[in-house]
Amino acid sequence: MYDFIVIGAGISGVSFAYKASKYAKTLLIESQDYDREIPERTNIFAEHNKPFVDDVFWNDDSIFPRPFLQLNYKSEKCDGLLHSKEFGAPLGKISHTEVLIKKLIDKFRDQGGKTLFNENVAKIVRHTDYIEVISGKGESFSTKLLVLATGSRGFPLQKSLGFGVPESYMGIYTNIYADEAILNENFNFQYMFHLNPNISQNGPFFFNVGKGRIATGYLGNRESPTELKNKLIRILRNYQKIQPFMKGIKLDESIPCISGGISKHPISSFSKDRVIVLGEAAGLVTAFFYEGILCGLASADIAATMLEGLLASNSNFSSAELKKYDAEVARVLFTYFRNGNACEYLFYTESSSSKTLWNSYSNLLNTNKTVRQYVYEAHINQDLSTHNTDNDRWVGERLFATIPVISKMTLWPKFLKAMSF
């Protein structure tokens, strides 16, 4: 009998398993063969993630090989730049996330945690005082509490347990390798977020610049994996707005691409008797930026902290007790989410207004120091429950003031509604 079984070894599942194994007998199950290979991921890791990562990892240069110094909210007309030197400290770091996951797994095992990789879960059976997990090979494992951290790779398990499922879109990314000299010459930023409704009306195209590699892709459409990859190759080869960044970087159609569902919008409940849901599986992703690492780390930390006391008191992990997890997730994240919801409503819309708004916002970032300061503060604030939504409204008001008069006439109802989020 395990205290906890965790299904899914992405950032939320592994982070939870590592923290929980300090006080609980824990099994981590993952369908991919992580003993052989963990897929490479290059991500921005804003400073607001720091409270959820132990210093032994935060200070490890193999995990975080470069600081996150400058972002580029790029529009068709300009590069909307924010450099952290204006405010005295980096926006965060750039992570080679597969290294973080590997080191979390190693620490988890050192603490007595058990792993079962390259194994699917076929069925979950509720019993009166425990939950039974049956693998695809027919093996049975029992646990006092089940933790679902399955991301957006499909939701049959949580559906079978009576949970809702988040809204999900398709996305694709790939890592492209290049000499540091080329990356330093081509990229004066570590993160680029670019909206173009011709690419997608539901999400951005992005660059994350790591050490010797860049991650690039786009989010928000519903094409097949083949269509997603073909489109990404066309963008990287032909889209004029990004060609200066691709100069001297070799690109061929054999590059491995990872495509799959990307969740957003929280489900109605993250817990039931003896079960909790973490991270992207619960729709805990910021709606505009599709920022999933923060929410995965935060929900894992909240759960691991709360469950320690319940386990020590010999809890039966009832829904009533686990509702404390739902409430704390809402307290920590949902104020910050309001800005993402408002931006989603404003910017992910029909083509002409989306371009107008994003062009105006990129220019506003360049020309208004207070806007830059508020964006900077959102990246570095380590207590997101105190996120200042008045700052977001102020930026929204400045944005409305800068758009063309004819656009004001048609867009003011949307701004009014966005201000109410």
Image (cartoon, rainbow, N blue to C red):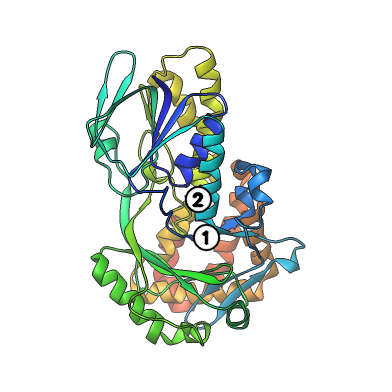
Q: What residue is at 33 percent from the left and 78 percent from the top?
A: 253
Which residue is more in the foreground, 70 or 156? 156
Where is residue 367 shown, x and y percent of the image? 65, 76
Q: Is residue 293 left or right of residue 202?
A: right
Where is residue 168 shown, x and y percent of the image? 31, 53
Res. 331 visible in picture: no
Alpha-carbon neighbours of circle 1 within 10 Å: few (<14), some, or many (≥20)? many
Q: What distance separates the C-alpha of mark 2 from that of mark 1?
A: 9 Å
User: Where 383 sits versus 114, above or below?
Assistant: below
User: Where 163 sits versus 88, above or below?
Assistant: above
Q: Secondary structure at mark 1?
A: strand
The residue wearing badge 1 is: 43
Q: What residue is at 44 percent from the left and 24 percent from the top?
A: 322
Where is residue 317 shown, x and y percent of the image? 42, 19
Q: What residue is at 25 percent from the left and 71 percent from the top?
A: 227
Amino acid at the residue labelled 1: Asn
Q: Secondary structure at mark 2?
A: helix
The residue wearing badge 2 is: 293
Res. 43 visible in picture: yes
Amino acid at the residue labelled 2: Ile
Q: Is residue 318 left or right of residue 98?
A: left
Sooner in the amino-acid sequence: mark 2 or mark 1:
1
Residue pushed farthest right?
Answer: 88
Alpha-carbon neighbours of circle 2 within 10 Å: few (<14), some, or many (≥20)? many
Tag 2 near tag 1, CB within 8 Å: yes
**Which of the 4 image quarters holds residue 54?**
top right
User: Where 415 sits versus 73, above or below?
Assistant: above
Where is residue 163 shown, x and y percent of the image? 30, 34
